[in-house]
Image (spheres, rainbow, N blue to C red):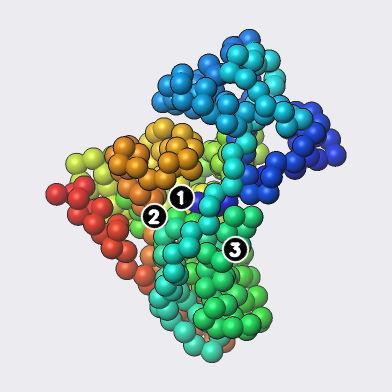
Amino acid sequence: MHAVHPLRPSREGSLNGPIGFVPPEGSIVLTFLVPPELAGQRLDHFIRNRIPRLSRTRAQEIVAACAVRRDGTKRRSSDRVQRGEMVLLVRPRLEEPTDPIEIVVLHEDALVLAVDKPAGLPMHPTATYHRYTLTFALRERYGAGAPHIAHRLDRETSGVVLCGKTVDAERSLKRAFEARQVKKTYLAIVRGRLDAHEGVVDVPLGRAIEGLHVLMRVDPEAGGLPARTRYRVIERAQHTSLLSLEPETGRQHQLRVHLASIGHPIVGDKLYGPDGVEPFLEHIETGMTDALRMRLGHDRHALHAHEVRFAHPATGAPTTITSALPADLRGLWAEVSR
């Protein structure tokens, strides 16, 4: 999952009027627009309405810890929300893990490095992650001339990552990704049994109007960017399916949003599952508890970058790099399919 960038005021005021403060670097910011039908509600009642499954006590705790006005001052549960207002919740930055990073090399030659990114490892440094990143791990292993990453995976997504070992190789790979000349295949474990053996989700995506600032949504009518995903059922269990996915475009969170849009969200997804963003918020505060794991179905979203096919930047020869389904997802499928 990507780090969430803090809100910053624009010249016009990016959130329905000028903002008198900039949240601390690395803060996780949520926004909720007050529709006419909810105007006049207490703030804690409004938060319960916008975030599923919250008790009143939990909503009051969130308000006390996170709710701020546009000038940065604290709000109270008894405050009344106003029509058209953008309610702000600002949460502290996440703590950077200190676990050692182990990177498995899948392929290496003079120009191309392919590694098997473990789940939970961010690609690049952010306000929260400095040393616990794939970029840092590559520099530790290769020194100042470390290979450069040519594309992105979400933090919780595992699997194949391509890197260029020279500037020209990096540029060549990035151009190939941008031109959609790189073919990617993912494996995912999703909720529910899909009836069709295969299909296509062809729905534009855009930024969510409210919620986390990395949250995406299907956007068929409001000028969203084209997004297309092919899927094929590999195996079915009673309440889950194992899918092969081929994104024909590369939008942020595309696979996760597309699968959720057809009623089959990825198991373990803290943002696009049936409970919305509430599991993500809970995970920030408590970490992964047994109760949260039961609701999500797994510790992380069950998505794996399985295969990448591309023309080698030196020779143009067709090249395929494959990463097997990792142990945690093999274990998950064994559990749900028995």
- Give the CA separation, mark 2 to mark 3: 24 Å
Which residue is depicted at the point 62% across and 58% down? 126
Name the amino acid type tagged 2.
Leu
Specify the farthest residue to the bottom: 110
**Badge 3 amino acid:** His
* 72 or 164, nearer to the observer: 72
Determine which residue is flagged by label 3.
Answer: 130
- Is 54 drawn above or below residue 335 in the view shown? above
The local crowd at label 1, few if under 14, some if 14 to 19, many if 20 or more residues have their Cα within 10 Å, is many
Q: Is 224 situated above or below 61?
A: below
Identify the residue at image location x=84%, y=35%.
12
Q: Secondary structure at mark 2?
A: strand
Q: Secondary structure at mark 3?
A: loop
- Residue 278: percent from left, percent from top: 46, 34
Q: Considering depth in this image, is 8 or 127 the residue closer to the camera?
A: 127
- In space, the residues marked 2 and 1 are separated at their CA atoms by 9 Å
Report the label total. 3
Residue at the spot of label 1: 255
Q: Are marks 2 and 1 in contact (CB under 8 Å)?
A: yes
Rendered residue at 53%/16% (across/down):
45
Determine which residue is flagged by label 2.
Answer: 303
For this orientation, the residue located farthest to the left is 338
**Visible in this render: residue 231?**
no
| Earlier sequence position, callout 2 versus callout 1 | 1
Q: Is residue 144 visible?
A: yes
Q: Which amino acid does the dot numbered 1 rest on?
A: Leu
- Image coordinates for residue 191, horizontal then vertical, percent: 31, 41
The quarter of the displayed image where residue 208 is located: top right
